[in-house]
Each structure stands twice: as structure tokens, then as C-alpha cells.
Image (cartoon, rainbow, N blue to C red):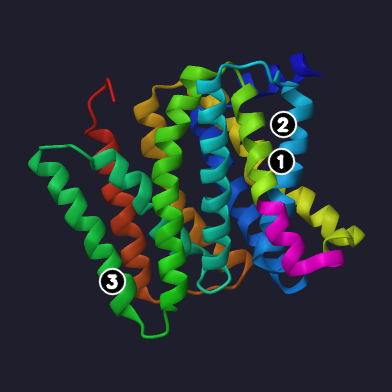
């Protein structure tokens, strides 16, 4: 089966793998939003991380014999992953998918621009800031609490990138990812149980939760790893910059969340800023 999967991956161009991963993540987020009425945002996060951890633990079967430093990184990674998802789903409960992802994307964009002294990167930062102004001023019905939760999710996403780099240095293959996902599940599940109780164990809810975990975590992580094996990281980053636009499109098609023209313009501003900052990054970054 693994050889067959490998041949299937090899037949797909790397850019297509990245785009499939982006679509998978956003469809997973849309499916999670449909779960909110039954188990709330915390319940949806708990199911996603629990099933994702179970699949990854079975796939990688990681060892617990690691140095104290490695365990510190794994635990930090897991806690940040849980908080990122909890904040993002709280935002998703209040604002459209496309807007939530656009605001959240400011986190990795900040990481990409941090420490830069190039005038062009200052332009990309201003362009992203202009996008935020358009989001806030384009329509008066944007929920401020949802905006702040998305901003918090973006902050944790930036930290996730930094700690994820350390995770790669201190663990091998997918072991750190699997253990970190297990830590994230341990953090998130109590919130889900407290909010939803026995509603979490309804058969259809469990099936939907498994679908969210596969679409939002297992499938895109696998596709991204394969794509990164066959393409430069900078090209990968530029393609990932399409994520806010894809989120807005999936939100429109799956959730019927239509955006105002100024909000679409804001999404495109953040996409352009992210692609520009990634393209201009130094190769060693």
C-alpha cells in the first residue's frame, strides 16, 4: 500500500500537491463549522485533534525515549498547536472562514518579515496592514471578538512555525509531530468535554470529527511533506500564500459565506503581501 501511495504521489506535480493540501484544510474547516451547532467550537477542536493524534500515533508509533530538551519542545509545540486551533475555531464561530484565515495568516507573514531591513518588505507589511484596515472598515458587521480570536490564532501560528522548526531539529521523521499532536489533544479534549459532554460520542459526530481530522490535519500534512521533498521551500511558501483566497472561495461555495468587495480586496492584499515577502526571503531563511 505504501509503495502504491508513493507512486500515486509521484504522478502528481508538487504544486498540485500543495494546492490539494490547501483545499483539504479549508474543506475540513468548513466541515468543522457545520459541527458547531452540535458540539460547539471546543468540541470540534477536541474531535479534530483527538482523531488526528490517534492516526499519527498509529502511523509513526513514536518512542517516548527522548531527551528532556526534546520533550520540552514537543510539549511546547503541542500546547501552541492546541491554543492555535481553539482560538481559530472560536473565531470561525463568529466570522466567515475567508476572513478568519486572512487575519490568522498575519502570524506567518509577521514571522516572514521579522528582522528584515529591506524597503520592499516594509511595503509588503503596509499592504497587509491595508488589508486589515479594509477588513475592519469595509463593513460594520464584522464581529470584533471573532477578529481578536483570529488575531490570537495568527499569533499562535507564528509561534507554531518557530517551535515547529525546533521540533524538526530535536526529533526525527514524524515522531515529534505525532507526540505533539497527542499533547495538543490532551489540552483540547477537556475543553470539548466540558462544553459538549456526551454529545461528542454521537456516531455521526464521531464520523464527522474523523473527517475533519483527516481533511484538516492528516491529509494536508502528508501532502505538504511530499511536496517539500520535491520543491524549494520558497516556492512552497509562495503557493501557501494562496490559502486566504482559497478559504474565502471554500467559504462561499460550501458555507454560502459571501464577502463584500472590500473584504475580497483585503484578502488579495494579504495574499499578495505574503507571496511577495516569501519570494523576497533570503534562501537561507
Q: Is residue 190 magenta?
A: yes
Q: Earlier in the sequence, mark 1 or mark 3?
A: 1
Q: CA distance from mark 3 to mark 2?
A: 39 Å
**Could you classify mark 3 by the number of other residues whose Cα lies within 10 Å: few (under 14), some (14-19), or many (20 or more)?**
some
Residue lying at the far front of the rendered structure: 68
Secondary structure at badge 1 equals helix
Q: Which residue is mark 2?
A: 56
Task: Classify residue 285 by image quadrant.
Answer: top left
Badge nearest the viewer, 1 or 3: 1
Q: Nearer the viewer, residue 117 or 81?
A: 81
Q: Are marks 3 and 2 in contact (CB under 8 Å)?
A: no
Q: Nearer the viewer, residue 153 or 138?
A: 153
Q: Which residue is mark 3?
A: 134
Residue 127 image position (x, y, % from top left): 21, 57
Which SS type dominates the magenta stretch?
helix
Q: Which residue is mark 1?
A: 52
Residue lying at the far right of the rendered structure: 203
**Could you classify mark 1 by the number of other residues whose Cα lies within 10 Å: few (under 14), some (14-19), or many (20 or more)?**
many
Magenta segment: 188-199
Q: Is residue 72 visible?
A: yes
Task: Classify residue 21 by image quadrant.
Answer: top right
Residue at 54% in and 73% down = 257
**Could you classify mark 2 by the number of other residues whose Cα lies within 10 Å: few (under 14), some (14-19), or many (20 or more)?**
many
User: From the image, which quarter does the N terminus lie in?
Assistant: top right
Q: Are marks 2 and 1 in contact (CB under 8 Å)?
A: yes
Residue at 56% in and 16% down = 67
Residue at 76% in and 49% down = 211
Secondary structure at badge 2 equals helix
Badge nearest the viewer, 3 or 2: 2
Decide if residue 5 is on the left or right side of residue 102: right
Amino acid at each position: 500500500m505504501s509503495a502504491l501511495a508513493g507512486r500515486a504521489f509521484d504522478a502528481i506535480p508538487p504544486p498540485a500537491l500543495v494546492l490539494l493540501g490547501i483545499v483539504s484544510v479549508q474543506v475540513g474547516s468548513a466541515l468543522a463549522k457545520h459541527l458547531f451547532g452540535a458540539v460547539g467550537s471546543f468540541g470540534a477542536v477536541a474531535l479534530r485533534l483527538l482523531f488526528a493524534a490517534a492516526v499519527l500515533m498509529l502511523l509513526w508509533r513514536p518512542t517516548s525515549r527522548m531527551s528532556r530538551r526534546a520533550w520540552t519542545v514537543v510539549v511546547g509545540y503541542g500546547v501552541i498547536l492546541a491554543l492555535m486551533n481553539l482560538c481559530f475555531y472560536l473565531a470561525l464561530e463568529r466570522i466567515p472562514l475567508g476572513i478568519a484565515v486572512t487575519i490568522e495568516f498575519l502570524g506567518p507573514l509577521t514571522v516572514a518579515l521579522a528582522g528584515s531591513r529591506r524597503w520592499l518588505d516594509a511595503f509588503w507589511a503596509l499592504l497587509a496592514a491595508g488589508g486589515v484596515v479594509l477588513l475592519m472598515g469595509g463593513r460594520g458587521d464584522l464581529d470584533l471578538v471573532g477578529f481578536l480570536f483570529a488575531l490570537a490564532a495568527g499569533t499562535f501560528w507564528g509561534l507554531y512555525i518557530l517551535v515547529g522548526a525546533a521540533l524538526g531539529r530535536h526529533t526525527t521523521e514524524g515522531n515529534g509531530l505525532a507526540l505533539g499532536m497527542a499533547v495538543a489533544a490532551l489540552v483540547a479534549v477537556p475543553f470539548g468535554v466540558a462544553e459538549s459532554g456526551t454529545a461528542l460520542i454521537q456516531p455521526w459526530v464521531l464520523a464527522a470529527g474523523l473527517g475533519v481530522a483527516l481533511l484538516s490535519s492528516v491529509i494536508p500534512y502528508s501532502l505538504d511533506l511530499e511536496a517539500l521533498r520535491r520543491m524549494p521551500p520558497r516556492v512552497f511558501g509562495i503557493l501557501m500564500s494562496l490559502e486566504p483566497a482559497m478559504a474565502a472561495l471554500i467559504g462561499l461555495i460550501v458555507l454560502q459565506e459571501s464577502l463584500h468587495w472590500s473584504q475580497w480586496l483585503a484578502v488579495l492584499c494579504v495574499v499578495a503581501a505574503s507571496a511577495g515577502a516569501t519570494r523576497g526571503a533570503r534562501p537561507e531563511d
